Image (cartoon, rainbow, N blue to C red):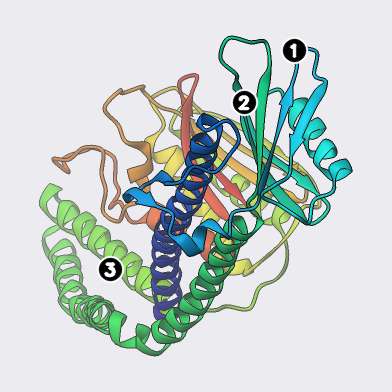
Amino acid sequence: MIRRLKIKFIVISSLAMLLALILVLGVVNGISYYNSKMEIFSLMSRISENGGLLPETVEYRSIFGEAFLTEESRFTLRFFSAVVDKDGNVISIDRGYVSSVSESDARACIEKAKLRNTDEGFVHEQTTTYAFQKTKLKNSDLSLYVIMDCTRQLRTSHMFLKFSLYIGLISMILLLLILSIFSKRAVAPIARNIENQKMFITNAGHELKTPLAIISANTEVLEMTEGKNEWTESTMQQVQRMSELISHLITLSKLQETDEIVLTDVNFSEVTEKVATEFRVLAEKNGLTYETGIAQDRHVKADEAGLRELVSILVDNAVKYCTEGGTVRVNLEAKGHNTLLTVSNTYPEKSDVDYSRFFDRFYREDESHNSEKKGFGIGLSMAQHFVEMFKGKIHVNYKNGMIHFVVTL
């Protein structure tokens, strides 16, 4: 159990750190890309406003405010412009600010930009990425296309993204190492409390057995000397009830001590059939309708004694809490590669019942604990532990006037 607790601590901490890294690095990279895009199209707007020529002073926008091109940075801009008529025919191309782009390549970029059917965006030509912006020339049907080589700016953003991924990966590896080293210390107080709790339950259980045995023996002597009466019968019933509670507590404590058990092939059908048969007499004695539907030859990986206890707990719970004159059903069926055990019983619908809490230890729907039904609220908790040991799942649902406990193995 402590090992599972350490693993859960490492997994939850790692997921929290991973989420934080994704959010932080995602926001930082998003801002970086958005800023690059803003700067590119802001520069192109200034060029478009100047008729496709680079102005003497270039002021552009970024997320950090207004900025200016320096004398040196002006020479790093590589762009060309073209005038296109309303039919999409290229009238003229100005390649004065770029030398590596031939006229045929320029026309190819313009054609790709026209196909995008937007006023601005990105196109790719071989290994180069271009940003384009289309504006209408005043008092004419002509359009001006400004196309800028933005490979360097976008490559910077891509390199920053790659660097961020490396940083995130290294951070996660370091975090896993640190968590693995310190996880034992982190869960030590919880582990100590769990161990103390288990020791207390076991020791208290054994200590309580002695006075209960004495009370039982004294009551038997009274019955032998003075005869049975309602007081001695009540005392014996309470002794038996306390003995069952102690036994359940010790069993539950031992279950929690078991981190790993050897799972073997068990005939789930045979186990369910035997348990269902044992409870049939009790159910019919209580005036209940008892139905079974058990698929044959269903095998699962489990501990046979534990599996038998699991089925017994669920069927006993169904018989015990079924409404008067109601129905108890025990079904075992195949579902894909899994086997489903469904134990159902008639149960009054109550809107304020949280069925998921039925697996909580000592939970009783009747919070006053004065229910006429005999139970401690431990059985279903034990059932859940058995299912977890068998690597399965258990859940409860309410439908058509019946409560259903479903085990998937």
Callout 2 environment at 10 Å: few (<14), some (14 to 19), or many (20+)?
few
Determine if residue 259 is in view: no
Q: Which amino acid does label 2 sit on?
A: Asp
* SS at circle 1: loop
Q: Which amino acid does label 1 sit on?
A: Lys
- Which quadrant is the N terminus positioned in? bottom left
- Residue 128 got which mark? none
Which of the two labelled residues, at mark 3 and mark 2, occupies the earlier sequence position?
2
Q: Which of 3 and 80 is in front in this view?
A: 80
Residue at the far bottom: name it: 181
As drawn, is 218 to the left or to the right of 188?
Answer: left
Residue behind mark 2: 119
Q: Nearer the viewer, residue 45 or 91?
A: 91
Task: Name the spot of residue 317 as percent of width and height, x first.
Answer: 42, 44
Q: Which residue is at 66% across, 73% downward?
A: 263
Determine if residue 356 is in view: yes
Q: Which amino acid does label 3 sit on?
A: Ile
Foreground tag (3 vs 2): 2
Residue behind mark 1: 86
Q: Which residue is at 40% across, 67% downward?
A: 17
Above/below status of 388 relative to 325: below
Foreground tag (1 vs 3): 1
* SS at circle 3: helix
Above/below status of 180 relative to 251: below
Task: Name the spot of residue 204 as percent of width and height, x first.
Answer: 19, 78
Q: Which residue is at 30% across, 51% downward?
A: 377
- Which quadrant is the C terminus positioned in? bottom right
Residue behind mark 3: 246
Which of the two labelled residues, at mark 1 and mark 3, occupies the earlier sequence position?
1
Task: Name the spot of residue 321 as percent of width and height, x first.
Answer: 38, 36
Q: In which quarter of the image is residue 367?
A: top left
Q: Quadrant of residue 82?
A: top right
